[in-house]
Amino acid sequence: MGSLEPDSETETGTGTETETETETETRTGTKTGTGTGSGTGTRTGTGTGSGTRAGTRAGTDNDGDNNNNSDSDNDGDSDSDSDSDSDNDNISDINNNIVVIGGGPAGLIAAEIAATAGRKVTLIEHMPSVGRKLLLAGRGGLNLTHSEPFDTFVTRYGAAAPALSGALHGFDPSALRAWCAGLGERTFVGTSGRVFPQSLRATPLLRAWLRRLDQLGVKTLVRHEWQGWNDDGSLMVHGPHGTRSLRPAATVLALGGASWPRTGSTAAWVPVLRGIDVEVTALQPANCGFVVAWSPEFAGRFAGVPLKNVRLSFAQHSTRGEAMITAGGIEGGAIYAIGAPLREAIAADGFADVIIDLHPDLSPAQLAERFARTRPSDSTSTRLRRVGLTPAAVALMRETGCAPDALKALRLRLVGSQPIDRAISTAGGIAWSEIDEQLMLRRRPGVFVAGEMLDWEAPTGGYLLQACFSTGVAAARGALMLER
């Protein structure tokens, strides 16, 4: 989950927050309607009580929405918020329910779909509260999805696009926006086409969502960890009162990848599934920063300074946006967009040379004309600033030994990537050959998979959360079809 998407863009409008995307967002209308859409359940409920079931309180999100029933840590990593299972909920009554394991966006929407269809649903989460990855995404304004044409949208998932297209069609960006509106959280389209809630925050959406789940009768067990299957095929779930065996009618696994493990995405499921011969492609960091061997002087002065409106190219891949200089390298939306081929090259060769156009709006001829208008007596740095380069861009040219006439093709060597626990999302996961069209594991009938457990990756921009929602819906629908 990206899910998940602290990019590098500044959103303007009511309730402005700084986020981390690649350009300036302004509201351009395009509000959602009021329909709930796409069969995800139209019961929004009017109750205002706080008595959600065990551990379903939203707590504090990362955009600073503190309240008395809140988590105290900005990534939700606190044990103080939960209505834990101290009364030892009769766990045996879970048998024959639909069990959803994982309380991120994919798991929560799967629980809603199943409960809306009239099924008894139990949601199991090993952390003290649910929705932690969603709250983390609230730091960046909660970029839910993207408004570009659907045919273009699907291509953002690269090699996984054919496998994901069915789920994405089944719960597409317009359906996600309608679902948000049904929870009282209207959305808007920013100037880059990214879609955000009007509040630019995750907490209001999560609170409304948890109220809906409670009204639908979803039972939530926090501090309960799925540990695999017993020899008889029953689920092993360890909680405060020991390890229990469950026999649900169907199971949805939505345990996430391996990024930001403090939110609960620890990838502990990988050895469990490999243990039953499910092929799992190695998890790797995606939408992550890359390592550059800066000089101490450059890193000390320019760490945290953005390179705005640059074009980055590698092999046949090219992207335009913002990149951020860090103490150990470079990160940001522009580098994330070409991260997969860079990661592969570094794995194969130990490095990757990315080409940076520091002034993509001007052609070489236009740049030459601007240089001609500068004074020859000026220093090189002054002349570069006069043609429109920022101090950081000028310093980057000095750092890399780039000649002034090569500012449209600066070569920057990347020698590694940030560790997976610092990545926004992960690549890799359960191979598509291991699941059927309903996202059911072929080796474990009755078990469905959603979210980042599957082998796909996408850039930031709303694509991560959308795929988590879409696969969660698809997995739940598959579980419901199982009993027809």
Image: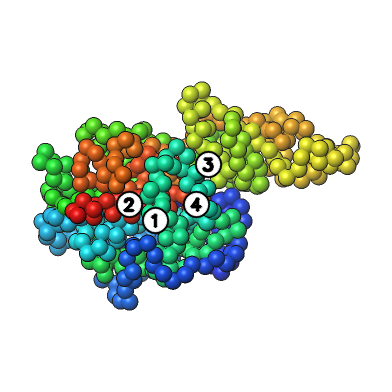
The residue that mark 1 highlights is 171
Q: Distance between the residues labelled 1 and 3?
A: 25 Å
Q: Do the residues labelled 1 and 2 touch (CB within 8 Å)?
A: yes
Describe the element under mark 2 as helix, strand or loop.
helix
| Classed neighbour count for the residue bearing mark 4: other residues with Cα under 10 Å, few (<14), some (14–19), many (≥20) | some
The amino acid marked with disc number 1 is Phe
Residue under numbered circle 3: 336
The amino acid pointed to by label 4 is Phe
Q: Distance between the residues labelled 2 and 4?
A: 18 Å
Q: Cβ–Cβ below 8 Å for labels 3 and 4?
A: no
Q: Which residue is drawn at 37% across and 50% down?
A: 167
Q: How dense is the environment of label 2, judged by Cα within 10 Å: few (below 14), some, or many (20 and up)?
A: many
Where does residue 395 sit, x and y in percent of width and height?
70, 38
Q: Name the residue under label 4.
A: 150
Say which residue label 2 marks: 474
Q: How far apart are marks 1 and 2 (CA)?
A: 8 Å
Query: Mark 1, residues whose alpha carbon is within 10 Å: few (<14), some, or many (≥20)?
Result: many
Quadrant in the picture for the C terminus: bottom left
